[in-house]
Every structure is written in C-alpha cells, then in structure tokens.
Image (cartoon, helix red, strand yellow):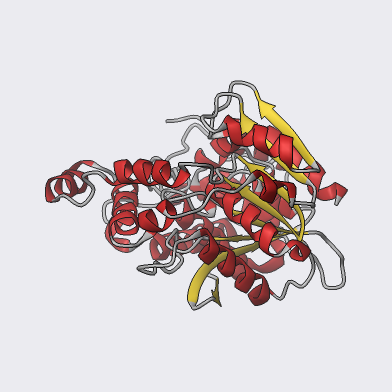
Amino acid sequence: MPGPSPIAESWTRRSGFSAYDDDSYDDNYGDVDAYTDLDDGEEPPTEHVADVLETVSDILVDVIGPEYLLDLEIGIQTRFDEDLEIESLEFVALAERLLHHYGGQVDFVAWLATMELDEIIALTVGDLVKFIVVSTKY
Amino acid sequence: MPHVDANGLRFHVQELGTGPLGTARPKVVMLHGLVADNLSSYYYTIANPIGLVADTYLYDLRGHGRSDVPESGYTVADHVADLEALLDGWGIDEPVHLVGNSFGGVVALAFTQRFPEKVASLVLIEAHFATEGWGEHMAGSLALAAFGLDEDGVKDWLAQNAGRKLSRLARHSERLLMQTTLIDDLQRERPFSHEALAGIHCPVLAIYGEGSDILDRARDLEAHVPRCELHIVPRCTHSVLFEATGFVRERTLAWVAAG
C-alpha cells in the first residue's frame, strides 16, 4: 500500500481528519469508513463521503471519457497522474465542474493555492474527496 | 468548459478568485507559451495563489488547449487582437496586469506597445520577443519539433506505446504545426526594436533563468525599458516558471499587490 500523499498528510494535520491510520485502507468504495476516523470525535456521515466520492467519480468519467476508464475502478487511493493519466486541462475541467456542483462552499482556488506543482501532481482522488467533505461541513 | 467568443474564435477561459461584487481588486491576465503549452501551466503554478488577491483570467491561446484551432492567423498581431477582444468579452475596462511566459510574453509586450492605456504593468517570464533572425530560429525549432509527427509509423508507435496523455499531445501538436500557418506566420515576424522597448512606459517585472538560452532578451529589457526590474534566477533555464515556481509566485504576488 503506498503511503499518504503530501496533500493527504497536510490535510490530516489541518483538519484532524485521517483516512490513513487504518491498516485496512484499500482502493475500493468500501474505504469510505476510513474517512470517519476523526481525532476530535466529530465524524462525517459515511453516506456523505460516499456521495462525494460518487460525484467526483461521475465527473471524472465524464471529463476523461469512459473509454479510457474501462479497466479502472475509481477509489479514494486512485492517483490522478499515475493511475488516471489525467491531462492538466482535464484536471482544470474537473475543478470547474466541482465548483459548479458544490458552489462557493468549496474554495478550490484557496486549496490549490496552498500546493506546489509536485503536490498537485501527486494528488489522489481521496485527497480531493477529503477536501470537499471537510469544506461542505459534512 | 467555460469559454468566451472573441475575434471570431471560441476561447477556453478560466476566471479564478473573482471577488465579491463591489470589491476593487487588481485584474491579472496570464498568457502561456507555444505548442505544448496551455493555460494549465499557470493553473498548476501561480494562478491560484494570485487569484487570492486579484481577479485572475487565464485563456488558451488560439490553436492551443481547448480553444479553437484556426488554419491561419498566428501572427503576434493576431494574438494581440485576440487579447483585446477577450478583454471586451470579459467586460474589463480598466488597465490590467499582464503576465506572459515565453511566447505569451511576446504577446503581452506587443499588446502593451499597441494599447498602452490598457496595461497597468507587465510580468515577463522568459519573454521570447523577436530579435534579428528570431523568425527563422522559431520556425526552425518548431519544424524540428514537428519532424515526423505526421508520419504513419510514428503515429502507430505513439498509439501502441505512448500513454493517452502523450498521444493526445502529439496529435494536437501535429495539427497545430503541420496543418496551420503557425510556423510561416512566426517566420515573418519583425524584430522588436530597442526603440520599441524604450516606448514601454508601464512598470515591467522581468524574470529569466540564469541558464536561459535567451538571456540577451533580459539584458535588452533591462537596458531599454525605462521602468524594468530584472531578476535572473540562479540554476534555472527557460523553464523558470516550473523550476523556481515559488520565486516567480512570490515576486508576482508582491508586484500585483503593489499595484
């Protein structure tokens, strides 16, 4: 199992919200339970995490094209660059679509502004889901 | 994808960090480089941080990214006309800060020469403006980049061996280089004279890499543009935007914030 990306670590520090403490972490939809592991006892409803993951996955399929994702199930450990080979403009389109979906409560500009180029490239779907879950106050 | 129709073409655009109604924030427009480049080079580097303090506008130049790819019309003047029309399309009627990387810096410089009243300041990152022989040099470089892209064997190899991203980039580059007048148009560009540089009166922040192959442009800007602040970044090349992103971001942020 690859370790958490730099962004995952950063958001864990800032939100007290970790998906990576659980040794059973894997790459399936079932992992959403891992997102309920909060240090302060506040837990986002599992359904909300699953909803966000489903929304992100649906938009990704639309942006990248289903023909390129035939053999790949999108999970929280899926890496945008290495697994999805997402083009830079497709990532821009994904952020644009999510902004329209969630509105002003999800501030992608502020989030991306905190990252260096290599951190954006290393992002996982889980990093993005976690950011949205925290932003939308679960 | 969001777009603006301007100068007879459809441009893919991104507007970042537009502030609440009634707030006065600086306006920044960013112009990217040629062929393999598009607005994402800013989106991944300095655009979002600058979007926190300024209304920031990105667009794919004609023939690039998700913008239209016309068969002809790739002179610097065509790109200047695009930018003028885009500013109208965005409803911007105040002077803007233009940030140009490589060829984007050429367009920003030429736009400022043509419409000085529309420009608050320039940030030129490795601006690759024309000097004597520039057209031939650019045409030669682009022809070399295009070499073989249109051959069936190369296409087959890319289809079988390259990833989705590389294959699409190769196809897009082939179309731009082989099926448009880009190379011919750039070959005919006239040099940007020292007198023209002396006529740029807005403040100019110029950033070049110490190992850049166009460091002579940095020296020309410093010598001839009246209000030029030049930074040469150690251990960097023409790709200074990516090699020293933090430096470029911090300098540009401070520059825009200072107005």
- Between A112 and B154, the residue placed more toward the observer is B154
- Between A116 and B200, the residue placed more toward the observer is B200
Which residue is at a point 42% across and 44% down the rendered structure image?
B138
- Between A73 and B201, the residue placed more toward the observer is B201
Which residue is at a point 38% across and 67% down the rendered structure image?
B72
**Which residue is the extreme one toward the left?**
B153
Q: Is residue A92 above or below residue B46?
A: below
Which residue is at a point 54% across and 42% down the rendered structure image?
B131
In the picture, residue B107 is in which quadrant?
A: bottom right
Q: Work out whether residue A132 can be spotted.
A: no
Q: Which quadrant would the N terminus of chain A be assigned to in this image?
A: top left
Q: Work out whether residue B72 can be spotted.
A: yes
* Residue B249: % across, % down: 70, 40
Q: Is residue A80 left or right of residue A13?
A: left
In the picture, residue A117 is in which quadrant?
A: top right
Q: Is residue B154 left or right of residue B20?
A: left
* Residue B106: % across, % down: 58, 50
Which residue is at a point 73% across and 71% down the rendered structure image?
B92
Q: Is residue A49 above or below residue B158?
A: below
In the picture, residue B120 is in which quadrant?
A: bottom right
* Residue B59: % across, % down: 56, 61
Q: Which quadrant would the C terminus of chain A be assigned to in this image?
A: bottom right
Q: Is residue A5 left or right of residue A80?
A: right
* Residue B166: % across, % down: 32, 46
